[in-house]
Amino acid sequence: MTKTSMFFTEPEPRRAQGVEVAEGIQRMVADNPGKMTYYGTNTYLIDTTEGRFVIDPGPVEDHDHFEAIVANLGPNPTGILITHHHSDHFGAAPALRERTALPVYVSRVFPDDAFEPDGYLEDGDVIGGLTVLHTPGHASDHLCFSRPDGILFSGDHMMSWNSSIVSPPDGNMRDYCTQLQRLIDRDDKICLPGHGPVLRDPRPYIQRLLGNRMRREAEILAHLSKTPDTIQNIAASVYKKSDPHIAMAAERNAAAHLEKLLSESRVIQRGEIWETTEKPELSDR
Ligand SMILES: [Zn+2]
């Protein structure tokens, strides 16, 4: 594992193959690489006191990945856990249930009414010895799963390879920051994210993630103290992303920051234009 900027990289993982990343935990990387997914979605197969669980079967399109999960279920498969409803994590879950008859467990606030889960999970629930944390922000229904020996399955709430997109209305920056702070206040030894490599000693990294968000927020307020502006102009000025796909993500993140600031009465919105309510001489530093 090498490090560029504050984020972590790794060589392209082999596909359709489970690799043990911690005792009793196999990681398998789906073949859905992209600007938002790195090499692809991480599926984890976890041996628990109740049997083997699958966390996030991945996208529905990756047949080889799907078959590799089925082949790696072992003699005592028990259930399928979903971190959040986005299709790169949840997509293959209905087909995997169909194929294996394993129950699928999702958040109590899972937003996809078309899917009938076998069980709902809430903050504080324990399943297979894993404690459920409801961590809204990236997605309203996002769950992390914590093993008592200090391993946290952090999904897309906290990723090692990049920061997470927070896109309103389902994404919520205020919740996201609260839930990042919650991870900082914990004492996890290893994070296993939804995309990207294993992250050891996660706390300093998560502190930097939260620090980056706070810096962006300060930059947005500084920009608005000079001129009321649209989301597009604010994102272009603060994030400076030329790649159109990344620029779009930056706009969604800027929108999320503005909604957070709106909920805190620190900005107001007039049509397309956002303004700060703070005095320029205080915020323009
Ligand atoms: Zn994802």
Image (spheres, grey):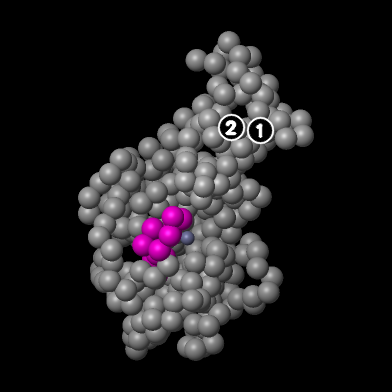
Q: What is the spatial separation of the Cα atoms under label 2 and label 1, in whole angstroms?
A: 6 Å
Image position of 205 (left or right of 266): left
Cβ atoms under marks 2 and 1 closer than 8 Å: yes
Residue 131 in picture, x, y percent from top left: 45, 62
Q: Check disc 2 and give the amino acid type.
A: Ile
Q: Does residue 182 show up? A: no
Examine the structure image and report whether residue 210 is included in the region drawn in magenta. Answer: no
Q: Nearer the viewer, residue 173 or 52?
A: 173
Q: Position of residue 202 (x, y in %)?
A: 33, 47
**Residue 196 as seen in the image, left or right of residue 103:** left
Q: Nearer the viewer, residue 152 or 97?
A: 97
Quadrant of the rendered image containing residue 259? top right
Q: Residue at x 30, y 50 (%)?
A: 8
**In the visual, does 207 lie left or right of 280?**
left
Which quadrant holds residue 254? top right
- Residue in the image at 55% along x and 80% along y: 94
Q: Label 1 sits on what residue type? A: Thr
Which residue occupies the extreme top position in the image? 281
Helix or strand or loop: what does disc 1 sit on? loop
* Magenta region includes residue 41: yes
Measured as percent of width and height from the top left, residue 189 is found at 30, 52
Q: Residues within 10 Å of mark 1 (few under 14, many from 20)?
A: some
Residue in the foreground of this view, choosing between 162 and 137? 162
Circle number at residue 199: none
Above or below, comparing residue 206 to residue 197 in the picture: above
Residue 71: image location, x then y, percent? 35, 86
Q: Which residues are magenta?
A: 33-43
Identify the residue position indicated by label 2 in the image: 234
Residue under label 1, please give it: 230
